[in-house]
Image (cartoon, coloured by chain):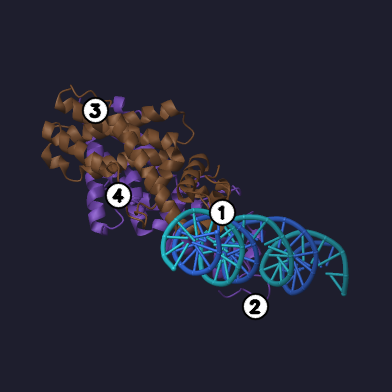
Chain colours: A brown, B purple, C blue, D cyan
Amino acid sequence: MKRTSPGYHHGNLRSALIEAALDLARDKGAGALGLREVTRAVGVSPNAAYRHFADLRALVLTVALEARHRLARAIIDRLDTIAPGLDPARRSTERLRAFGLAYVEFAQSTPGWYELACASQEAPPDGVEEGAPPPPHLILLGILDEMTRAGVMAPARRTGAEWSCWSTVHGLAELRVHGPLQALSGEEAVRLARLALDTLIQGLTAKS
Amino acid sequence: MKRTSPGYHHGNLRSALIEAALDLARDKGAGALGLREVTRAVGVSPNAAYRHFADLRALVLTVALEARHRLARAIIDRLDTIAPGLDPARRSTERLRAFGLAYVEFAQSTPGWYELACASQEAPPDGVEEGAPPPPHLILLGILDEMTRAGVMAPARRTGAEWSCWSTVHGLAELRVHGPLQALSGEEAVRLARLALDTLIQGLTAKS
DNA sequence: CGACTGATGTATACACTGTGAACAACCTGC
DNA sequence: GCAGGTTGTTCACAGTGTATACATCAGTCG
């Protein structure tokens, strides 16, 4: 909240706005993101934001991109907990399970960021990207390819498998955050998620 | 648009508002529902709505309930197309598939109503209900019970199976309406939905 | 040093939203 | 025919996003 120089200019309003928006979304949901609300949190006049973003939509898109990065990093971190020593078959299925659990737990621990990550997936207008993690979608494709290579999933089942997985995982998150699973405790929700992931894996890897 | 008597009072503003709101949601999405917008469509002053609904939220809840009924009826109609002569095992799985396809196709043909049906599942404050169809959730439970009775699904897998199904189906709809499947044609989306449902059924019914 | 210049934050204004309060027209029962 | 409740209108207010004009800073060039 403190300005780099006590004077008029803020210093780096842009990042301050993004950070304030992230806080706001985490605490009150993605729907609470408003131009006046965010600028108020930073302690600056509403129209100051227009020096750094074309409009509210552009701000939200930028913040959403950051949320997607955090989701991706959460997934990657979780994938890295799977011991590399396992045999490829077991390892790849465990990685699929870890992917799903990371997705759902990200949604349930920070619903506002999850909402942001899903809503308006477009890239913000200012395109430059550096240390961006691979998007969750690509991570999933990689895991499914591992599974086919390892022989746990028949190549015939590979077609469209990403959408089966994505549906299950995204559906779970959605039910948890906006749907009838809202009331559940974290552990119960995770238990249900594990069951759904078991069914999914069973369906992907079943013989015949 | 024409009033029952040329005079002041509208006659049955309440149903007119609900109908206008349904039209608006179908054409421009659930997010486009605004108090002024709806009353404008009916040709009445904004505050007239307050004689029939406590606030905008109450109106939306009422319209959302109607949308849920239409979803339920779409599902039931589709279930009834499954020939009753089939053997119970085959029939119950076909009914599960029909459930999923009906859900997804409702979402893709009338996304605005689908949004309404999902968002804010609470019942509207004015509680009276008469010819209401059973909610989709109960329909699904019934189908799963049929499947276990018919022996296609092991009783051990029955626990939490509704959430596996619901996740897949709701996830598909969500990806279709708000997610990366938006761009697809109707047929392509249905093909992917069939694949995902195959995987789901495979997972629910696999031996061992 | 001092003035010019671009970047950045402010002030004012406007159209829009949901909603409360006071008012007016209508319908119904006595 | 008139009292009283119901229903729709009007006016008002706080809130929103955003366009325009202005003020103030941080440099750079003479």
B184 with respect to B42 (left or right): left
Image: D12 above or below B91:
below
From the image, tell me which residue sits under label 1: A36
Q: Nearer the viewer, mark 4 or mark 1?
A: 1
Q: Position of residue D14 (x, y in %)?
A: 68, 56
Q: Quadrant of the N terminus of chain A?
A: top right
Amino acid of disc 4: Leu
Q: Secondary structure at mark 2?
A: loop
From the image, tell me which residue sits under label 3: A94
Res. A178 visible in picture? no
Between residue A55 and residue A3, name the one nearer to us: A3
A1 with respect to B115 (left or right): right
From the image, tell me which residue sits under label 4: B101
Q: Quadrant of the C terminus of chain A?
A: top left
Image: C24 above or below A3:
below
Amino acid of disc 2: Pro
For image coordinates 42% across by 27% down, the residue present is A188
